[in-house]
Image (tube, rainbow, N blue to C red):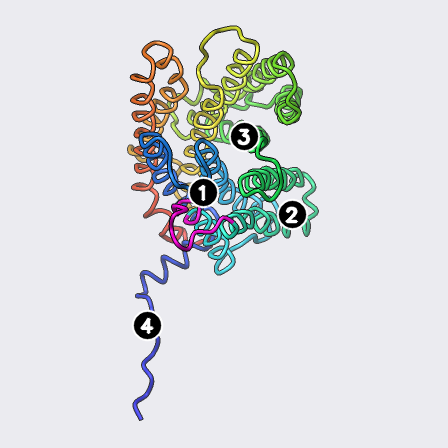
């Protein structure tokens, strides 16, 4: 009797790469986020050129969902799985658990991009898979947070829960589970506001700290009152938006909040970061939050007839810039490498910044030259976004798949 053949196995290098990939949360999720950034924008541009599509969510709702609940949540997951582990000194997820969590996110992206004419496409399955990711992530994060009594970070779990409710509202309205179709766009706006609130919480902790540690300038500090007003104002804008209050109230609160977002940076040492790409990209991303709120104030108050896009200042500007900068920094620091960027990474920061500026200013192109100028500006901006994240992948795929050079775990 012939003995059974042993099961096929991966070569040693590939097994090591997989083991390394799922050692810490930032590794798989940063790669997935950057890959999705490269994929999702061309799909959206194609939909715009074709005048529609057969994707599961129509129009801008699909685009917004995939950039918030696809791209942004992947970066958030990678960052928080790593940060909570450091904050609590307890493990979050690695190995099979981390692989399963990443696989759940990836399955959600595949289903969201399958044309609904595909025989196996299902609204219900797609909705349930996508709605499963944030609760599982929150549960994984909650274990070390609760065990260590890390009450400071309960608010992060609350933000994730609120994000999930926004996503539930989006799917409920689209799939007809409840009669909420009029609220799908409100849910998208609310989700964006929640990500911005999380950004304000996290950047207030880490950007002054990173800048002080890197520059040695000991006068760099936070302004607690400005932090409270900036974060409180962002929360107020979320609530006011959901209540659909008048433009005057939204405009005034947006102006105050945007001003205090920028005021909180006064002692962050921005001028000391200009020669350090890993720092100035974070300062620029945070500044986009303030700019976005100020543009929103101008829109709501009707000060100008045509205003650059406040939503894209917050989405592409703040979220896009900060996520690229944070992935670049964490990808070096948590793999035991020197905090010195590769030239291609520096180029990616500049390319993304130019693309963001074009996207934010695109409404002005429409005002000047109509549709004939608007779509080409979107195409260039989207192409620059893709190039920036391709450059990130070129530099960071080898880094994120390789063990730490110092031999430490993670």
Is residue 114 found inside the magenta-colored segment of the image? yes
Please state which of the two labelled residues, at mark 2 or mark 3, is closer to the viewer: 3
Alpha carbon separation for disc pair 1 and 3: 15 Å
The percent coordinates of residue 407 (x first, y second) are 41, 54
403 sits left or right of 270 in the view: left
The percent coordinates of residue 203 (x first, y second) are 54, 30
Query: Is disc 2 in contact with disc 3, using a CB cutoff of under 8 Å?
Result: no
279 sits left or right of 147 in the view: left
Query: Is disc 1 in contact with disc 3, using a CB cutoff of under 8 Å?
Result: no
Please state which of the two labelled residues, at mark 4 or mark 3, is closer to the viewer: 3
Is residue 318 found inside the magenta-colored segment of the image? no
Please state which of the two labelled residues, at mark 2 or mark 4, is closer to the viewer: 4
Residue 185's disc number: 3
Which residue bears the numbered disc 4? 8
Which residue bears the numbered disc 1? 56
Dot 2: element: helix
Query: Is disc 4 in contact with disc 3, using a CB cutoff of under 8 Å?
Result: no
Query: Which corner quadrant of the image does residue 185 belong to?
Result: top right
Image height of 33 relative to 61, above or below = below
Q: What is the magenta range?
A: 110-123
């Amino acid at each position: 009797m012939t003995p059974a053949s042993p099961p096929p196995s991966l070569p040693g290098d590939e097994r090591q790469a997989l083991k390394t990939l799922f050692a810490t949360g930032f590794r798989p999720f940063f790669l997935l986020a950057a890959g999705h950034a490269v994929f999702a924008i061309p799909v959206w541009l194609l939909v715009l050129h074709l005048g529609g599509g057969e994707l599961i969510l129509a129009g801008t709702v699909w685009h917004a969902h995939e950039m918030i609940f696809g791209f942004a949540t992947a970066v958030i997951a990678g960052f928080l799985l790593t940060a909570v582990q450091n904050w609590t000194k307890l493990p979050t997820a690695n190995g099979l658990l981390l692989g399963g969590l990443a696989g759940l996110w990836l399955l959600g992206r595949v289903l969201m991009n399958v044309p609904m004419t595909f025989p196996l496409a299902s609204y219900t399955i797609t909705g349930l898979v996508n709605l499963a990711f944030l609760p599982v992530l929150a549960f994984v994060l909650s274990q070390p947070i609760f065990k260590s009594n890390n009450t400071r970070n309960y608010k992060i779990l609350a933000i994730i829960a609120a994000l999930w409710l926004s996503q539930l509202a989006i799917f409920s309205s689209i799939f007809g589970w409840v009669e909420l179709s009029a609220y799908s766009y409100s849910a998208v706006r609310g989700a964006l506001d929640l990500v911005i609130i999380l950004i304000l919480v996290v950047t207030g902790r880490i950007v002054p700290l990173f800048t002080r540690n890197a520059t040695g300038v000991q006068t760099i500090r936070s302004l607690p009152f400005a932090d409270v007003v900036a974060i409180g104002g962002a929360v107020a804008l979320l609530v006011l938006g959901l209540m659909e209050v008048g433009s005057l109230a939204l405009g005034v609160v947006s102006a105050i909040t945007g001003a205090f977002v920028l005021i909180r940076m006064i002692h962050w040492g921005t001028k000391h970061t200009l020669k350090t790409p890993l720092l100035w990209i974070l300062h620029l991303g945070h500044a986009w939050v303030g700019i976005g709120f100020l543009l929103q104030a101008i829109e709501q108050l009707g000060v100008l007839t045509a205003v650059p896009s406040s939503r894209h200042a917050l989405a592409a500007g703040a979220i896009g810039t900060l996520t690229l900068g944070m992935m670049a920094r964490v990808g070096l620091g948590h793999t035991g490498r020197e905090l010195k960027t590769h030239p291609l990474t520096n180029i990616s920061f500049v390319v993304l910044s130019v693309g963001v500026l074009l996207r934010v200013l695109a409404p002005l192109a429409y005002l000047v030259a109509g549709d004939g100028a608007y779509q080409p500006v979107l195409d260039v901006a989207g192409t620059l976004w893709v190039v920036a994240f391709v450059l990130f992948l070129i530099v960071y795929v080898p880094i994120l798949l390789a063990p730490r050079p110092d031999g430490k775990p993670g």
